[in-house]
Amino acid sequence: MKIGIIGSGTFGQVLGAGFSSRNHEVQIGTRDPKNERVQSWASMVRTALGDFAETAAFGEVLVLATLWSGTENAIRLAGPQNFSGKIILDVTNPLSFTPNEPPSLSIGHTDSAGEQVQRWLPGAKVVKVFNMVGSSHVIQPDFPGGPPDMFICGNDEEAKKTAARFCQDFGWPVIDMGDIKSSRLLEPLAILWMLYGIRTGSWNHAFKLLRK
């Protein structure tokens, strides 16, 4: 499958390498495809590079892996028409940073980043996924208590099934939390994940739902 990843930061690179290693055709979208650091990384993991519009047009499935502050502009540069009808894996979190304070959410309670992305891209099938764990554990998470769970949500059932297959390929059991409004609950999990890391000085943790 052709996977287009909008965003060439650490998370986008890790997901790009993960998809590429599982024989998907991957293109990374970046603001500057001529950046030597990004070019060097792309050549090592067998992925193509393009600008946002080229990558959005390329992908059958698209991944939004941008900083939240740049997400709306990245979509504009990519061309909203290039997202129409496609599955969008939204890994963004609407993080807000204040000096000497822990991170917080800039959107919450009555709205979410996932819902905003769906409104910006009404013709697309947005699935919130991969937003509550660090990049070092997103591919084949290995914890003593067994694999953690990946919570997902979205309005389109078939799109969520596709996202779940990707999660399972990466080693994640999946829990479907319903429609895209559940992003209001999944995005705060990212804050919980970060606060635990700040308090303990360790980033080797993830979430698991225990049930019987």
Image (cartoon, rainbow, N blue to C red):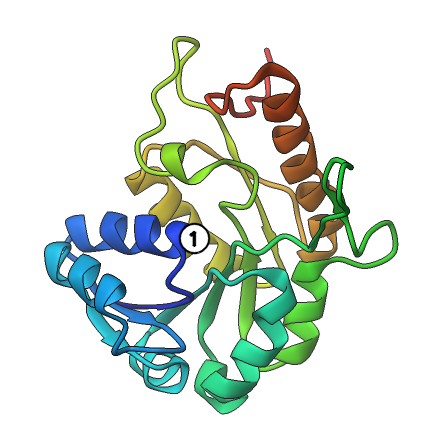
Q: Quadrant of residue 1?
A: bottom left
Estimate the x, y position of residue 154 in percent, counting from the top left: 61, 57
Q: Quadrant of the C terminus?
A: top right
Given residues 183 and 101, the one toward you in this image is 101
Q: Is residue 186 left or right of residue 133?
A: right
Residue found farthest to the front? 99
- What's the residue at 42%, 66% (across, down)? 7
Given residues 2 and 136, the one toward you in this image is 136
- What's the residue at 38%, 51% (across, down)? 10
The answer to whether 148 is drawn above or below residue 170 in the figure is: above
Given residues 139 and 36, the one toward you in this image is 36
Estimate the x, y position of residue 123 in percent, counting from the top left: 57, 82
- Count of numbered badges drawn on the protein: 1
Estimate the x, y position of residue 194 in percent, counting from the top left: 62, 32
Residue flagged by tag 1: what amino acid is it? Ala
Q: Quadrant of residue 5?
A: bottom left
Estimate the x, y position of residue 135 in percent, counting from the top left: 41, 40
User: Does residue 33 appear anywhere in the picture?
Assistant: yes
Given residues 201 and 191, the one toward you in this image is 201
- What's the residue at 19%, 55% (across, down)? 20
Name the residue tied to disc 1.
163
Q: Is residue 22 left or right of residue 75?
A: left
